[in-house]
Image: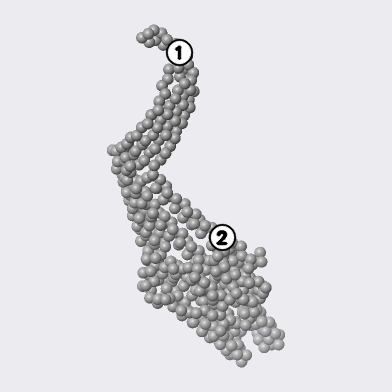
Amino acid sequence: MRTRLPTLIAALLCGLASASRAEDLLQIYDMAVQSDPRLREAEQTLFATREVKPQARALLLPNLGVVGDVDYQDVDARGNSQFGRFSRRDDFSTQGVQAVVSQSVYNRANWMTLSQADNLIAQAEAEFRDAEISLMVDTTEAYFRVLRAADAVGVQESLVRANERQLEQSKQRFEVGLVAITDVNESQAAFDRSRADLITAKNALDNAWEALRTIVGSIRLPLARLGDTLPLAPPDPNQIDVWAETALRANYGIIAASEAVGAAKKTIEIERSGHYPSLDLQAGYDFARSGAQFNTDSDTAFVGLTLNVPIYQGGAVASRTRQAGFNFRAAQDRLDQTRRQVDQQVKDAFRGVLTSIEDVKARQAAVVSARSSLESTQAGQEVGTRTQVDVLNAQRLLFQAEFEYLSSRYDYIINGVRLHQATSTLTRDILAKGNAWLDPEDMIPPPAY
């Protein structure tokens, strides 16, 4: 049974378009998948990285090239020879075509590059999967941030109306001499303060909508609110070490960092291969024709091996190898850092779920207590044992307790989503379970602009 105040219920339902159906969390997430630029960037990066494999394989496959040339020559030659002085004038063209096939027989760097491509692709795929999960989390948090901000507006609107009624009552009692002018002033101050807080809450709601639009684009339909029923269940299994071990094994961020370490290690071997000899095979056919008066036409076939033995290259190979070693150790440190962050994330989220369960129950009880306190304070004011300030404070505390109760329910859901994010087990099916808790008949209208 929902514990909202009747006035709050009226405020939350005010202005909703009854003919339109609300967007739920899954619909908003599907919109984000189609429009979020960060996810599209990660996808294109994955596609680009996958191309390193055929490029690395091409270094081991034969290369075929054909080179043709046509030259025109105008010769005007004169001089002396053993037969006397000569003079020659000739103009002619020459043509040549050369077809060459080259094949790397042995090049250690090429083989290491091919092996490294697998690490780079695996890293990109893990980063893309991590981006997909991050989008789920960002969308969920942005969605419930709107709901939380809308609850704050509803609470403030109800508080403004309650303070307005208190102000009117104080003025009426002052006119008949039942209260002093100080009660009127205190009621006026509370009313003005609640109106200022309402302005701030509405601005926060607009900002929350804009944050959601940044992810999913334009939203023209209202959002479904969280329904009355919210099953409060601890994580399954309810063992923090099991979740931590799963996260260290399955988290896509850790997998990506681990593959980056493997790629960096192979970069060391690629650079070190500059000290190794390389062997290449070449075969081809050379076709040459000349239109000169005294010419030689030739058709030449050739095949041969080229051995390159590097001896000294100015220290560049040794320097690049050392550089790759430093990058490898930096990648190891990033992996260690990622593991620690994930371990903290999963444990914080696990404890957050358990804490949220207790917090929701405690906040719900606090609402009941605050309501009883307000009723007692109002009764005390009637008999003169409580002041107007006491009533205003009790009224404010009731509305604050109502908002904190509603807010604690969002914290429970978000902590559960973050727990699945840390273990990389967050899927659309997981979101669907939380989506079932939304009420499509209870809606938050989008801003008019």
Looking at the picture, how far across and down is residue 422, in whole percent? 43, 67
Q: Which one is nearer the viewer's eye here, 10 or 194?
A: 10
Query: In percent of the image, x 43 and y 76: which residue is there?
Result: 235
Residue 161 can be seen in this image: yes
Looking at the picture, how far across and down is residue 430, in whole percent? 48, 71
Q: Which one is nearer the viewer's eye here, 284 or 242?
A: 284
The amino acid type of the residue labelled 1 equals Arg
Which tag, 1 or 2, sits closer to the chain's start?
2
Looking at the picture, how far across and down is residue 189, in whole percent? 63, 77
Q: Residues within 10 Å of mark 2 (few under 14, many from 20)?
A: some
Q: How many marks?
A: 2
Query: In percent of the image, x 45 and y 33: which residue is there?
Result: 67
Q: Is residue 87 above or below residue 43?
A: above
Q: Which mark is residue 35?
A: 2
Evaluate if marks 1 and 2 touch, with contact meaning CB atoms under 8 Å apart. no
Query: Residue 15's image quarter?
Result: bottom right
Residue 184 can be seen in this image: no
Q: Is residue 139 above or below residue 323?
A: below
Q: Is residue 329 above or below residue 241?
A: above
Query: In percent of the image, x 42 and y 10: which residue is there?
Result: 86
Looking at the picture, how far across and down is residue 394, in whole percent? 57, 83
Per the image, the residue denoted by label 1 is 88
The amino acid type of the residue labelled 2 equals Ser
Q: Where the N terminus falls, by quadrant?
A: bottom right
Secondary element at image label 1: strand
